[in-house]
Amino acid sequence: MNWLRANPFLVGLIAIVVVGAGVLTWLIVGESGRLAEVDERWMQQESEFKRLAALQPFPEPANIGRLDEQRKSYEASLRALRGQFAAYEGADERLDPSGFQDRLRREVDNVKARARQAGVRLDDKFYLGFEPYQNALPRESAVPLLARELGTLQRASLALIEAGVESFAIQRAPTPEEAGPAAPAPAAPTASTPARKTAVAGADLVSRLPFNLAIAGGEGAMRRAIAKLMEQRPLLVIRALRVRNEKEKGPARLTAEQLRKAADAAGGTGEAAAASAPAVVAAPPPAAPAVVPVDTVLRSVVGAERVEALLRVELVKFSAPLEPTRP
């Protein structure tokens, strides 16, 4: 204690040195921590730079300009694609349940009247495949798809009548919106289920509404009917086709004597038929062969028989194309 009192200057100097050393130590520790942070940021930025430099293409002004040109080209292609979809889709009609039922009655009456004029047979209970809605209203959520189906089936029925078929029937498969419960609202995105980048991500590009057609008529009318169905808009796709000929067995081959009699009945001499007869002889000529008219022979060759067809048809609906994602 006496030494401290005897040397106040030295004591003060020592105290200043101790305090200065403490402050200097604190500054060094703090700066070393900041230096470590700076070094870490530098390493991260250097790593990011190396990653960007390795990309193809490298994000420089020239490449960014080319990317912008590609985006504009994609947008133009998207607009053209929407125009092509519009040609297959057709316009949707906004109806409420009662409006749909009124339109359904009008279309059924129109198809039945056209069928009577053309001599096409329809079932007494024919209702364009919408028999459940003859006396009941559909669910409001199902009306848009039902209205689309109604327009398509009405146009398809008129096309079959125009093709000259003898009769047809429609069996429509119910849509999920008609009987099933309403789809639950999507859950809010969480950390485990992040939100999608676009509203239509994961949606089907094409949806299908199937129905069956049973058609009966001549072979020519059947060909015209199928061709007219393929020309319909919105687009119809025939997924399955089963055809049954009214004649399950092929025509019997004619004997030489039958060919000669047929030629004589048509006013010919019969020599030409007799000359070619051995190539088609199936059995010895009967004792009293019947005369076969020439039109029967020609009908067997051409194949103009009555046929019945069952078609599985799908009404195709396209979803909206994806929007280009902006960077």
Image: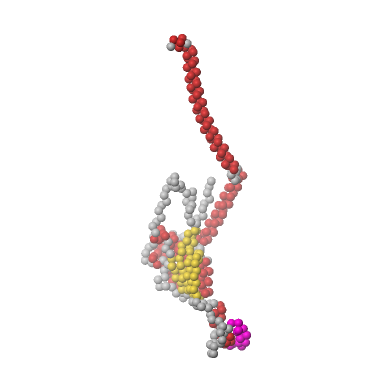
| Number of marks in the rendered image | 0
Residue 320 in the image: x percent, y percent? 50, 55
272 drawn magenta: yes
- Residue 186 is one of the magenta-drawn residues: no
Q: Could you say where residue 306 lies in the image, as x and y percent from the top left?
A: 50, 76
Q: Residue furthest front?
A: 284
The structure residue drawn at horizontal position 59% and vertical position 43%, both measured from the top left corner, is 54
x and y, in percent, of residue 292 in the image:
54, 85
Q: Quadrant of residue 63?
A: top right
In which quadrant will I find the N terminus? top left
Residue depicted at 46% across the width and 64% down the height: 210
Q: Which residues are magenta?
A: 264-280
Left or right of 59? Residue 90 is left
Residue 63 versus residue 10 in the image, above or below: below
Residue occupying image coordinates x 53% and y 74%: 220
Residue drawn at 59 percent across, 46 percent down: 56
Whether residue 162 can be seen here: no
Q: Position of residue 190 (x, y in %)?
A: 43, 46
In terms of secondary structure, what is the magenta stretch mainly?
helix
Instruction: Compare residues 264 and 113 and report the one nearer the observer.
Output: 264
Type of colouring: secondary structure
* Residue 229 visible somewhere in the drawing: yes
**In the rendered view, does 101 fall on the left or right side of 9?**
left
Residue that extends furthest to the bottom in the rendered view of this protein: 287
